[in-house]
Image (cartoon, rainbow, N blue to C red):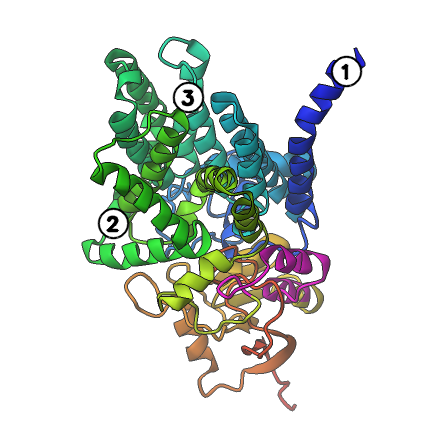
Amino acid sequence: MAEPCNRVYSSYFPILLILALGAFLLLFHLDHRPFWQDEAETACLAKNVLKYGVPLAYDGVNMISQEQGHEYDENFLWRWSPWLQIYVTAAAFRLGGLTTFAGRLPFAILGLMCIFLVYQLVRHNFGDRAWALWAAALLTCCVPFLLYARQCRYYSLGAFLTLASLYAFREKWQSKMFPALLLCFSLGLLFYANYLLFLSFTGAALLAAGLLYSSEMPLARSLKLIMAVGIIILPGLFLFSIQQQAAMVSLGAILANLENYFGDFFQFMFPLPLGFFLLWRWGRLLWTRSGLSEAPQEKFILFLSLVVLGNILILTPAPQGEFRYLVHLYPLCAIVLGWIVCRAWRYQKFSGVLLAMLLLGTNWLYVLPMDWLGIISRPVHNDPHMLIYPNLPLKLYISELSSPYPDVNQNLIRFFQTHARPGETILTAYGDLPLQFYTPYRVFGGLGGPIVETQPPDWLVPRWYTRWNRQYDLNESEVLIRQLLAHSTDYRPIILPAEDEIFGNQPDPFFHRFIPPIESIAPLIVYEKNPPTRQKP
């Protein structure tokens, strides 16, 4: 009896070890830095859900907006982005309180579930335990994925639903009810996580499946499934402002978005040399007319590669070419990379070990080829301790979590919690939403719409990095702060002993800082309104 138990233990021990490592990396010091602007948007809306039952942009004190007030209707009902992430956060707040840890916890758990689903998808469908373990390990050690999965946003939710739909697709959904329901609901919920992810993933997956798995897609069953997904997403098509955002689609931005997406993809998601390897391999098969191997593993790898490529191409007309819209593809890339590591190992063990070490411990295969070709992209204010330079990502990641980081939002929150008085108002050029969530004051400005104030604010927070709206005009908050400070003695500056970083805990690997910058960016300055002078009797 002991021998079968030992076999079971030895069979599951590696994945349990990987999951334990993933749990540590995802949950350790989950609240070490406060919500930044985008996270705080979700958190503030979730807080209003607890109060009103629906996500309202106005709570009687503060207005939530990053799009000049276009996100809500005349009743302040939020209609800009889907609600699933908001209600997930609200449920977490209900159970764990209005804390940073509670807000991020469900998304970190979903990130951990992604690691297990990657393993299960490969192991269950192809029986290759080594491939499954390598794929799970690569996703676990992928620092950009960890950064996004620790956010109070839809990123890990989108990745989980993407994986769930792929898992259902490889099951017998053609004849069994449960896989069909799982496929239907995972795609439907993906729409309510983020409809851009839904459009890009389902469009690409449908085309790739039709090309490679057409014999496994009976027409009647496929049409029923498409109709069922359509019924699920139908209310959202009317509830959310999709048409308003579709009007912002710019054909002129396609080339720029293509450059940004592919640049970020090869710099942070999939090494360019391994992309060339896949092109060479499949190009050689086409050139020699030997055809694609009928091995289900390689067919699935080609399917995932086409899904990733299709995602990027479908996203290019969108108004914002943001890397966050590719995060749900990280598990797919981990599966492909795990397959390549296994092939390298079977070809030559030393090559497989070397490739695995480079992928698990460094970002050299991502950054160095791009640097050598002169196509690497770096922000103007960069630092060698960022993922845009050759580094050991996990070392940087653990260094950040194990030591206090002077977060710009944390410094502002602490300052106003200490110095502001009840009833006072704060006008800030950016970072208004974290202040709204963590402090009781009226905070306005940021990227919101027109500012209507009858009295000058008690506090001003200009930011050194100038922000523009979608019409490339200065934001209202920037204009008003400059007007109030121009030739005025009404405000006195207070220089905080902190850096005025652009974002705070921004997860984008292009911007994220693990260690405080070596060179000073700019001091963080707050302006306090001078008290009225007493008139002499």
Mark closer to the chain start, 1 or 2: 1
> Mark 3 highlights which residue?
170
Residue range (magenta): 386-414
Front residue of 384 and 51? 384
Label 3 Cα crowd, 10 Å radius (few <14 / some 14-19 / many 20+): some
Q: Using residue 159 as the reference point, say whether residue 191 is left or right of it.
A: left
Magenta residue check for 410: yes
> Mark 2 highlights which residue?
317
Q: CA distance from mark 3 to mark 2?
A: 30 Å
Q: Using residue 366 as the reference point, say whether residue 259 is left or right of it.
A: left
The residue at 27%/45% (across/down) is: 313
The three-letter amino acid code for the residue at tag 1 is Glu
Q: Nearer the viewer, mark 1 or mark 2?
A: 1
Circle 3 — which element? loop
Q: CA distance from mark 3 to mark 1?
A: 33 Å
The residue at 48%/75% (across/down) is: 464
The three-letter amino acid code for the residue at tag 2 is Pro
Say above or below: 383 vs 231.
below
- The image shows residue 31 at horizontal and vertical percentages of 67, 51
> Mark 1 highlights which residue?
3
The three-letter amino acid code for the residue at tag 3 is Arg
Front residue of 513 and 32? 513
- The image shows residue 430 at horizontal and vertical percentages of 49, 65
Mark closer to the chain start, 3 or 1: 1
Q: In which quarter of the view is residue 377 placed?
A: bottom left
Say above or below: 141 vs 226.
below
| Callouts 1 and 2 close, C-beta under 8 Å | no
Q: Nearer the viewer, mark 3 or mark 2?
A: 3
Q: Is residue 151 visible?
A: no
